[in-house]
Image (spheres, rainbow, N blue to C red):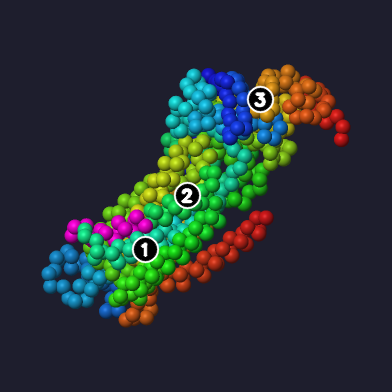
Amino acid sequence: MNTRVLRLTTTRLPVIDRRVVQTSMLSLVLLVAAWCSISIGAAKSDLLFPIKLIGEWIASGQNQSSIMMIVSEIRLPRVILAILIGAALAVSGASLQGVCRNPLADPGLLGISSGAAVGAVTVIIFANSLSVPQFIQPYLIPIAAFVGAAITTFTIYRLAQVNGTVQIATLLLAGVAINAMGGAIIGAFSYVADDQSLRLMTFWMMGSLASANWFMVAISAPVLILGMYFIHKKRTEINLLLLGEANARYVGVDVDRVKHHLLWLNAIVVGVAVACSGIIGFIGLVVPHILRVSTGADYRYLILNSGLLGGGLLVLADLLSRTLITPAELPIGVVTAILGAPFFILLLLQQKRKLVLAL
Amino acid sequence: MSILVKNLSVKVSNKKLLSNISLEFGAGEMIAVVGENGAGKTTLINCLTDGSFSQKCVSINGLPVESYSLSELASMRAVLTQSNDLTFPFTVTEVVRLGLSLSCLSQSQQLLAVQRCLRKVDALHLKNRDYTTLSGGEKQRVQLARVLAQISLDSELPRYLFLDEPTSALDMKHQFETLKMLRSLRQLNIGVFIILHDINLAAMYCDKILLLQQGQLLKMGAPTEVLNQDTIKQGFGVDVHILNHPTSHSPIIINQSI
């Protein structure tokens, strides 16, 4: 007995080490990306900006130089928002893939992001004719985006569910339909709205973090962090859902409750993310996929790792989007698609080869 | 300690799936359910294991099934269903560990339990493999290890295992070994309720055989009582010869003509 326990502890250590190393590596990637993104920009680049920033905070200096103003009031909130939104989209993608038991589920592909965008745009267009109290106004767009996201989430889920199983073909087709409809509605609205109509269109359809500020971080951060935390708390249940709904019930999971919680959490998280940045595709699809290939499919670690990698990737994508064609900016959705699509095809090819080998 | 079924009937849109079934199944007993396709075998397992199907006719250890919470039920009984696909590349160890998800064992205890269950189904050598690349029979054994892990091999409490054709994809050696292993579980106070299509296996390894036909319990009892030319003809519509196993003396059934 003693020897067996001994042997087990020695074989067990590497497993735990591997998990810790993986998560630390991903955190490091996120930190490096954030560091670079704070340091580099159109105004001036200096790799010591993050340190200078902390120095100024400690000194609580009132007379900030203009470049430090730019760093602390524009770049920093933008980087933080990018981390939060990237993490939220990746966590949402990972959890939706678990609920649907399919690697193709993603808030963008399923039309949830489109639904959120339509909700937000509707409120923007009709904001003037609505008489809402002053203090609610800043929250109006996130709330409308959440409502739009919730309606699409539950609509597509109901549509695709037949006899307790989610039919992925129906799910994706419903997503295609909702995306097309969302695009049409936003397109029509941006013609009704006279000024800046084209800019509005690109913002909602391809995303941008250019409007990030501390106020936006303050209202979205608590919701996104709590939403992701509650999704992470359901990690064991998501693992069991993958066994199939009947099996998950047999193992003790209240399947309907867990699924409803997760769908609501996804609607909240995606709604708020889209309200801040417009539709940013591919993060939710690609990040969990990269992690499954490299660190494994177990949701106990996948959700947390997705958050870290998603945040890191979106920070990098945002850095590229604002530096590639300075002084102009590329829509961030263009960057994530250019980076994400070929990589995704590569992964699919790899998986195909593996399947051929297995057969 | 047992599972008690009283006058269980199930009807779905005018089709009677089960009618008026009463039976008792004790922890430490091994019962095989046989019957033609669509006789109601899987429906019977659903009713015995899930409060939302049990029609208030089933009790486990003296209490109605529907009075237990899902997690209480999960610690008393485990169910192996026929289809067990996974979309994502979990390792075999991770799959078996899923059975322990709601238990409060420490990481090292969990790993120990997983290895023990994998050894029981002769799948320890697969522990680091990607589950999605396994063969059908290997997957079946790994899933069996998962349900074994769920009801814990260390507990003293009466527990029940429901298996829906657990040997359908296994080779001959593993069919024998799996049934032998299941038989040994009786000493751990585990009742095994198993749907089998191979009646000879059922006759050889199980204490009782339950013959279902069109939702009705045709006969239940020791293999020698249940398996004779009349009941087989009635249950399956096949003419057979009944032979005698040379050492165990359990009945062996073979076709009368080609």
Work out whether residue A320 or residue B70 is closer to the camera in this orientation and state it. Answer: B70
Calculate the distance from the C-alpha at mark 1 to the C-alpha at mark 2.
Answer: 21 Å
- Which element is circle 1 on? helix
Work out whether residue A71 or residue B69 is closer to the camera in this orientation and state it. Answer: B69
- Crowding around mark 3 (Cα neighbors within 10 Å: few <14, some 14 to 19, many 20+) is some
- Mark 3 residue type: Gln
Q: Is residue B88 visible?
A: no
In the picture, the quarter occupied by the C terminus of chain A is bottom right
Calculate the distance from the C-alpha at mark 2 to the C-alpha at mark 3.
Answer: 36 Å
- Residue A158 tag number: 2
Q: Which residue is mark 1?
A: A117
- Which of the two labelled residues, at mark 1 and mark 2, occupies the earlier sequence position? 1
Task: Give residue B116's position: percent from left, percent from top.
Answer: 56, 36
- Mark 2 residue type: Arg
Tell which subunit mark 1 falls on.
A
Tell which subunit mark 3 falls on.
B
- Residue A50 tag number: none
Toward the left, the furthest residue is A62
User: Residue placed at 49% from the left, 30% from the top?
Assistant: B51
